[in-house]
Image (tube, grey):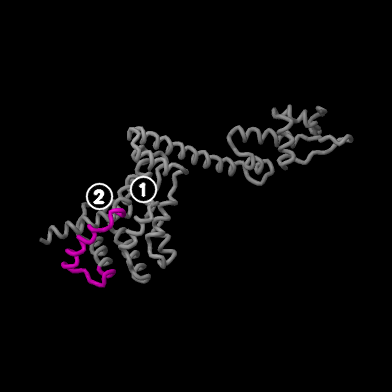
Amino acid sequence: MTTGTEGIERSFTIGALAEAAGVSVKTVRHYSDGGLLPPPARSGGGHRRYGDAALEALLTIRRLRALGLPLPLAGAVVRAELSLEDALASQQDEVERQLTELRWRSAGLEALRLAAGDPDGLRLLGEAMRHAPGRDAFADFWRRVLPPRLPATLRSAIIDAALPELPAAPTARQALAYAELHALTADRASAAAVRGEGNFNCADAAAFYRGLDEAYRLAGAELARAADPQPGQALDCFVAVHARAQGSVDSADFRFALGPLLAAADPAMGRYWSLAGELTPEPTMGTADAWLTEALATWRRGTR
C-alpha cells in the first residue's frame, strides 16, 4: 500500500484493504465479487488493487451491518441505489415487526402459563403462533361467508371493516383471544353456517350490506357518545334493512318478529365479534350490531 498525500488516490492490496476496513480477506473478496465494491484495478502481476472508494464502501457496509441492515440493503446504499434515510426507515420497520412478533410470542407464553398448561390452550396457541400473527385467516373467513357475486369494491370494504386490528403489545388475554379467533375462522363449517344465514341474491345482498353499513355507521356515532341502546334513526335504518331483505316493511309486527330471528343467529358470528372486541378497543361492526340488537330489545320492552 502506498500512503500518498492528500488528494492522491491510495492503492490497496486485498489484504491491506481488509486490514484497513477491519474485515477478513474473504469478506472483501465476497463483497467485491458481488458488485458491492468499485471494480478493482489490476497490478502488472494480475493482483487486485483497490482505491479509497473501496475502503469507504467497506466501512459503510460494516457500519450498516452493525446496525442490523441486511447485506442487500447495505449494498444498495453504497451503490447509491437507495438513500441512507430510506434504508434506515426500512430497517426500522423490520425491527418493529420483529419486536411485535416477539411481544406476541411472549404474550402467548404468558397465556399458556396462566392456563396452567391446559391442553386446549396449548393446541389453540400452538396452531395460531405457528406463523407471525396476522389477519389473513380472518380475511379468508369473510371471503367464504360473503355472497360470491357481491361487487368487488363492496366486498373489500366489508372485509376491511370486519377485520380487527392486532395490538402491537398484546396482553396474555388478547393472545388467547387471537388464538381462539384464528381457530374459529379456520373452521370451514363455521363459515358455512354463518353464510347460510344470508342467502340473498346478488342485488339484494349488495343493498343489504350497504344498508347495514349505514346502520352501523349511525350506531357507531351513538357508541362514540356513549349513548345507551335506544330507538332512533340508527335502529330505524337497521330494521328497514332487514325488512327489505325479507320482502317486508318496518312495522310493529316485524320488529317483534325480528328480535327472535336475530337472537337465533349462528353463535359463531357472535363469538367472532366477541373475540374481535378483545383485540380491538375501538367499536367494531360487532359492537354496532350488538348495540342495535339491544336497541331493538329496548323498543320491544317499551312497546309492551
Q: Quadrant of the C terminus?
A: bottom left
Question: Badge 1: how crowded within 10 Å, few (<14), some, or many (20+)?
Answer: many
User: Residue 160's spot in the image, x, y percent?
Assistant: 41, 56
Label 2, label 1: how far apart the Cα atoms are: 27 Å
Q: Amino acid at mark 2?
A: Ala
Secondary structure mostly seen in magenta is helix
Residue 228 in the image: above or below residue 146: above
Q: Nearer the viewer, residue 64 or 183?
A: 183
Q: Residue at x 81, y 27 (%)?
A: 3
* Part of the protein shown in magenta: 243-269
In the image, taking residue 131 as reference, residue 177 lies left or right, namely left
The quadrant in which residue 269 appears is bottom left
User: Residue 140's spot in the image, x, y percent?
Assistant: 42, 55
Q: Residue at x 63, y 33 (%)?
A: 63
In the image, taking residue 16 as reference, residue 170 lies left or right, namely left
As drawn, which residue projects farthest toward the left? Answer: 304
Of tags 2 and 1, which is closer to the observer? Answer: 1
Give the mark, 2 or 1, whose residue is nearer the N terminus. Answer: 1
The residue carrying mark 1 is 181
User: Residue 192's spot in the image, x, y percent?
Assistant: 35, 59
Tally the numbered discs. Answer: 2
The disc at residue 226 is: 2
In the rendered structure, are the residues bearing label 2 and label 1 in contact, judged by CB atoms less than 8 Å apart? Answer: no
The quadrant in which residue 39 appears is top right
Whether the magenta-drawn stretch holds residue 95 is answered as no
